[in-house]
Amino acid sequence: MRLESALYTSQNGLEVHGAAISVVGDNLANVNTVGFKGSRAEFASMVSDGLEGGTSDTVPMPGNGVKVSSIREVKELGPIEPTGRALDVAIDGNGYFVVGSTTESFYTRAGNFTLDASGNLVTADGRNVLGYTVTNGTTSTSLGTINITNFNANPSATSSATLKGNLDASASITTAASNPASFKELNSAASFITTADVIDSLGETHTATLAFFKTAANTYTVQAYMDGGEISGGTEGTPSLISSGQLTFGSDGTIPDASKSQATLTLSPSYANG
C-alpha cells in the first residue's frame, strides 16, 4: 500500500464520520420540531484489490476506508407530552394525518393544528386537515375539510366512575371526620385521601375529595366531599359532605361478595350552579 493510500483512508474516515456527526447534529437541532423523525447514519466498508495468500483467519485485501451507505429514518414513536393547546393532537401508534385538499392529499405526523379565518382546522403551513364528518350518526364516505365554527358538543354529566387501588392494611385505627373545617384538616385526619373530577350537567368540572378512615381492623369509612363554594348553601373553602359509606374487607384483604354492594358510593351533590 502506498503512503498516499494510507493518508486517503485516514482522510476518508474523518470525512465520513463528520457526515455522521452532521446527522446527529440535525437530530439535536430538530429536538423541538413537531412530528420530526430522527435519522441515523449507516456505514459500509470500502475494499480494494485482493491479495494472494489469504487464509481463514486473515483478510486477503487491504482496507480502503469507509462510506456512509445510507441515512435511515428512525420511525420510533417519540414522547407524547401535554401542550396546553386544545388543537394540538398526536397519534399514538401507526398512521398519519391527511392534509391538503380533496384532490391532492399529503400525509403528516405533525399535529400542531390551528384554525384559519373560516374556522377550518389547518396545519402550521396552512393546509386543510381532512377527515370524515358524522351527521346524525352517519359517517361520510369521502374526506372533507374539518370546520368547527358551528360545532357544539352538549355537555354530558358524569354518571359513574371507578376507583382502583390498595389501602394500607397497617394503617392505624382512627375516627371518621365530623364537619372538618378545612381540607387540610380532612387530609390530616384521613388514613388515605384521593380526588376525582366530575362534570355537572352544564359541563363544568368539580373536584370530589374521597377520604378513607380506618375505623376498625378490616373496616374503612369512606366520605366524599366537595368545596362548599360549589355546593348550594355551602361555604367556599370548607369541605361539604356529599356522600358517605363503609368498606368491609375479608381476612385476605379483598372485599367479600356479600359486601361488594358497599363498594358503590352514590354522589348526589346539590350544585350551586349546574
Image (cartoon, rainbow, N blue to C red):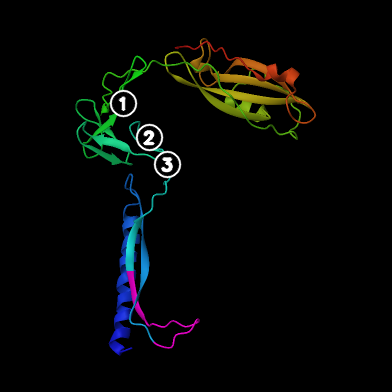
Label 3: which residue?
80
Highlighted range, magenta: 52-67
Instruction: Tell me, for residue 84, which label it has, or none.
Output: 2
Label 1: which residue?
132
Quadrant that contains the N terminus: bottom left
What amino acid is at disc 2? Gly
Nearer to us of marks 2 and 3 is 3
- The foreground one among 55 and 180 is 55
What amino acid is at disc 3? Ile
What amino acid is at disc 1? Tyr
> Going from the N terminus, do you reach mark 1 or mark 3 first?
3
Q: Is residue 160 left or right of residue 173?
A: left
Q: Is residue 231 shown above or below 128?
A: above
Distance between the Cα atoms at labels 2 and 1?
Answer: 26 Å
Label 2 with label 3: CB-CB less than 8 Å: no
Q: In this view, does 181 lie to the left or right of 125?
A: right
